[in-house]
Amino acid sequence: MRLSDKVIRKHPRPESGQSFLWDDLLQGFGVRFTPTRTSYVIQWREAGGRKPRVTLDQWPAVSVEDARTVARARLSKVTGQTRHGGGTPLNAAMRTWQERAATNWRPRYAEKVDAMIASYVEGAERPRLKLSPATRAAVEALGATPVAAVRRADVMAVADSIKQGAADQFLAICSSFFNWAYEREWAESNPARNRLKVTGGRRIRQRRLTDAEMLKLWRAFETETDPAFGAFQLLVMTGARRREVTGMRREELDLEAGTWTLPPERRKTGGRDLEPFVINLAPAAIAAIQRQPVLEGSPFVFWGRRDRRPFDFQHSTLDRVDAAAGVRDWRLHDLRRYMRSGLAALGVSQAVAEITLGHRSARSGLVGVYDVHDYADEKREAWAKWAAHLAAIGARVSG
């Protein structure tokens, strides 16, 4: 629970002895209640396991916010001096973290983290990024602050001075770093914790396309021809993610067996996947793949215009599709929700439907420890049901 004056006021006082209430926002900061007094305290763990406790000011003479500020400074001082990482400047510590962890990240994410640290923690000059004097001052101050002494206000001073999208990414990366630092006792808290609440939050998207809307989109993409139409077909029929489809390589396909095998490095979950993910392709999906022309020297099924990069959907293409289909407030990623909801309607079990979409959460925790079944037959049946459903609604509308 996050301590506040209201929480302390409502907390029952013991008739004898003492009781404690600890803050979720700053670990090691709490309130001690006795029959006659309410005092702020801090407590930390030393190398030998000893847990010293120090009494600070009394409540309500000092507000919780003011007491938390004092507690953070005291905790930073006592822990930062004894822990080898706590006194390291944030810019150096985050760079060390990035270099160690990058081997387990997807290349695109590693590049993003590298750029965010360089821009908003190290303050490096970048050709396409111009920081205002106020932003640069906030970045320099944050980067020079020891890890154990970084406050939420220090992080938010940078986040509040940059664009919302960049701020969300910056706070997410900071939160990941401080979770890592907390586990190593470099920091007593995570100053970027609850980052979405701090920046206003994000509404969880629940847009579900109807069968009629999907068919309108299908026909609109069909007028765009390939590769846009073929890639859209694969998104609808497989439930794969956008970049998994647009980056499809011919070496991943076995069209005789009707399978598409995604290696771990090509999936969102990256190195956390121990095995490749096999997708069973319906005849219509295979036909869409076979329809794509082969570009000599390119490994991609859906290839782009420049160099040998894979195809990707252009904003102009999506704008034309929107106008032609008349479907509002939709995104390509909504096709995954469309398939997932459709599988549930077709009677596919929750576990199989989640695994069919490649969600790791389907077998997290103890389920993942004890359930080692590959669900290959169940997934194949789910994709077959989905293909039959798509064929049925197409025939029903066209007929």
Image (cartoon, rainbow, N blue to C red):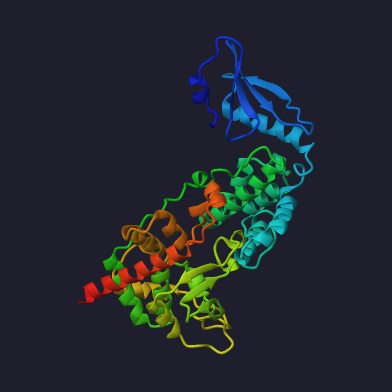
Q: Is residue 130 visible?
A: no
Residue 58 in the image: above or below residue 203: above
- Please name the residue shown 57% across and 34% down the image: 24
- Please name the residue shown 69% across and 27% down the image: 43
- Please name the residue shown 39% across and 62% down the image: 334
Question: In the shown orientation, is residue 17 left or right of residue 124?
Answer: left
Q: Residue 174, position in %: x, y?
A: 62, 50
- Please name the residue shown 55% across and 13% down the image: 14
Question: In the shown orientation, is residue 80 left or right of residue 196?
Answer: right
Residue 343, by quadrant, is bottom left
Residue 114 in the image: above or below residue 190: below
Q: Residue 142, position in %: x, y?
A: 68, 47
- Depth check, front residue: 203 or 103: 103
Residue 175 in the image: above or below residue 27: below
Query: Quadrant where the C terminus lies?
Result: bottom left
Residue 313, by quadrant, is bottom left
The residue furthest left is 399
- Depth check, front residue: 31 or 390: 390
Q: Residue 106, position in %: x, y?
A: 61, 64
Question: In the shown orientation, is residue 283 left or right of residue 252?
Answer: left
Q: Residue 15, position in %: x, y?
A: 55, 9
- Depth check, front residue: 262 or 366: 366
